[in-house]
Amino acid sequence: MLLQYSFKERIEKYPLPEKEKADILLGQALQSLDIKLVVLDDDPTGIQTVHGVSVYTDWTASSILEGFQEENRLFFILTNSRAMTSEQSAKVHSEIAEHVVSAARITNKRYMIISRSDSTLRGHYPLETNILRDVIEKYEHSKIDGEIICPFLPEGGRYTEGNIHYVLEKEFLIPAGDTEFAEDKTFGYKNSHLGMWVEEKTRGEYTADSLTYISLDELRRQAVDCICNKLMQVEDFSKVIVNAMDYYDLKIFTVALYKAIQQGKRFMLRSAASIVKILGGIEDRPLLSRQELVDINNPNGGIVLVGSHVKKTTLQLAKLKECPHIKFIEFDVHLVHDDTRFQTEIQRVISEAEHEIRAGRTVAVFTRRKRLDLNTGNKEDELQLAEKISNAVTSIIASLTVRPRFIIAKGGITSSDVGTKGLQVKKALVLGQILPGIPVWLTGEDSKFPNMPYVIFPGNVGNETALKDAVEKMQNN
């Protein structure tokens, strides 16, 4: 087990230089490079740092071409691949790569793909970026020099220092490999050192000592030329590990990265959401207000769906239960192995939820908190069972005949399925965030409930009162 550090001590170890210079350098870099950023999101929480950008929920050739034709520097494609089997994800990413290559040719635009994934290192890695690389290189007859690894996400308490990735718990930085996330049955891992994590995940194809590391010392010294020179040496899709404890670090790295790209280098990213914001030049905006989120003329109640089972979600649900004006409905997903009883349970939950919403009360539907043992000895079968449960949760929204005042979905897979299957969203606009790291879609005209702000609440983000705070913000005054 690695040592745990005080967050305050690690921050004080690396004092920040003047932030204004980093902003000036970043602004110059953004103006000097015209490149389309195609962000592939393996669950819908990757938009948690941005606003004013489009999210497409399919990856058809027409949708990707539309994204390339937008004036915005970047657009998102929601793959939700973390809920897929490896075979499904491989097929999806192969299709996306082909359509991206085609759209780039039609529009004559340079592009860079960002494979946005979990800030706690879960997901189909290295499968997805390997597929993207292979297909792009095949059709373009060119090489992608390297892959940048950057899971930094301060909104969720994820920091990288000394090449070790940490999760902030209260005032302490816990190595990611020592958290519950590393014990994920499908995407688990042992190493917190990102170089060793890459070696572990690639089964030794890329060894820790062969990778390129961008240190906090280099970033805080604004050693742009030094970092750029390191990037210029990367080849054969080797990995670049980016340390970061502040958005300042990402700004300096982006300056060096864009400089290397201008000199002919080509990269792909596997990252959390934070660097997307910086690469796209998206400015900060205040948190969304209640007036921007709620239709005050709608007399119906809202609905909260809680599907995530990580410890943080369960603690947040417990705090939410302190709210006296919310009707709580437990959904017994343990019945999933019995089709008849499971269908009866689904209909019960839908009926109760519809009744409460019509009566003007907010309802919170939560899956039974005792974790269901889906261990079948086959990871693919386990994913399929999890998908069956998620589809059941999604059907609650799909079956509603009344428009709720608001919808909040808790958990990455849950919120994705609610958005794409329940609300039938094809394209959404990212409004911003209701709380730090908690994004909001504005649903499109063709969705089940058009022009509705939809809160996508990651399972592993926020303090213990965050879910309660979000719901109270959406409630009547």
Image (cartoon, rainbow, N blue to C red):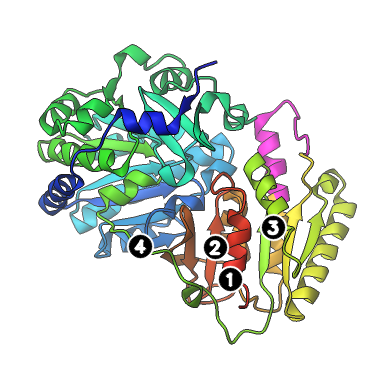
Q: Earlier in the sequence, mark 3 or mark 4?
A: 4
Q: Is residue 308 above or below residue 188?
A: below
Amino acid tagged 2: Val
Mark toward the start of the polypeptide (4 vs 2): 4
Say few, some or many: other residues with alpha carbon within 10 Å of mark 4 (under 14 / 14 to 19 / 20 or more). Answer: many
Q: Which residue is mark 2?
A: 455
Callout 3 touching callout 4 (CB < 8 Å):
no
Q: Secondary structure at mark 2?
A: strand
Q: Foreground residue, 240 or 112?
A: 240
Residue 53's tag is 4
Residue 328 image-quadrant placement:
bottom right
Q: Residue at label 3?
A: 320
Quadrant in which the C terminus is drawn? bottom right
| Mark 3 → mark 4, Cα distance in angstroms | 31 Å
Using residue 307 as the reference point, say whether residue 123 is left or right of it: left
Mark 3 or mark 2: whose residue is earlier in sequence: 3
Q: Is residue 225 above or below residue 54?
A: above
Find out whether the residues at labels 2 and 1 contact each other: C-beta distance under 8 Å. Answer: yes
Please report the residue visible at 88 percent of the width from the left and 59 percent of the height from the top. 344
Of badges 4 and 2, nearer the viewer stands 2
Q: Between tags 3 and 2, which lies in front?
A: 3
Residue position marked by numbered label 1 in the rendering: 474
Indicate which disc, 4 or 1, sits on the residue closer to the N terminus. 4
47 sits to left or right of 103: right
Mark linked to residue 344: none
- Read off the magenta span: 372-389
Looking at the rendered structure, the kind of residue marked 3 is Leu
Considering only vertical position in the picture, is 131 above or below 418? above
